[in-house]
Image (cartoon, helix red, strand yellow):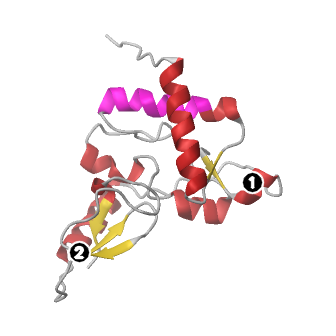
Amino acid sequence: MSRDIEVNAEKIDKLYGRLNQEAESSGYHLNPEVEFTIAIVKGLLVNEQRYGYWACPCRLASGDKTEDLDIICPCDYRDADLDEHGMCFCALYVSKKVLQGTKEIKSIPERRPSKDKRAKIKKRSINSISSLSKTVWRCRVCGYLCGRDEPPEVCPICKAKKDRFERFI
């Protein structure tokens, strides 16, 4: 039996405000179509209740956080999509050109590799070995690199959480 997940307007407004403030302070922009953006924010909150994390509401999440790390908002593909298409896959984030109306929003192709390709990429990164004295961690969202024993709790650039970092070297 399927149950509908309800999210109250106060939670939606609070998260919308938070995402907008974080985006603007980090050089990003939320989609200016507020009703559309609110629907995406609601989808994030529904997925948080369903899975325990903000899986992109425009993608099929597995329910396994480690398998879905690349599609937790902000997803690993956001910056590449913004650079190439002016918006991310779900259009929550848009480029300055889109915000200013000098670039039109169009649908974009899915950048996420298939499950098999993701497994191969993960295996390759686990097998890379280095003789550096510190581990180099890379934020999978924005590409921020840091050399330390453990990744930071929060990325200083895009505010992604610690679990969004991968061992780079």
Sort mark 1 into few (<14), some (14-19) or many (20+) by Cα contacts within 10 Å. Answer: some
Q: What's drawn in magenta, residue-wise? A: 38-51
Quadrant where the N terminus is found in the figure: top left
Front residue (pair 147, 61): 147
Sort mark 2 into few (<14), some (14-19) or many (20+) by Cα contacts within 10 Å. Answer: few
> Where's residue 15, x and y in %?
50, 34
Residue at x 61%, y 52% (from the top left corner): 24
- Mark closer to the chain start, 2 or 1: 1
Front residue (pair 120, 86): 86
Look at mark 2 in the image and give the residue it sits on.
148
Residue at x 27%, y 60% (from the top left corner): 119
Type of residue at label 1?
Val
Q: Is residue 15 above or below residue 19?
A: above
Type of residue at label 2?
Arg
Snapshot quadrant of residue 85: bottom right
Front residue (pair 147, 39): 147
Q: Does any portion of residue 13 appear in the rendered image?
A: yes
> Where's residue 3, x and y in %?
36, 12
Q: Does any portion of residue 88 appear in the rendered image?
A: no
Look at mark 1 in the image and give the residue it sits on.
98
Badge 2 element: loop
Residue at x 79%, y 57% (from the top left corner): 103
Badge 1 element: helix
- Specify whether residue 118 is painted magenta: no
> Where's residue 161, x and y in %?
34, 52
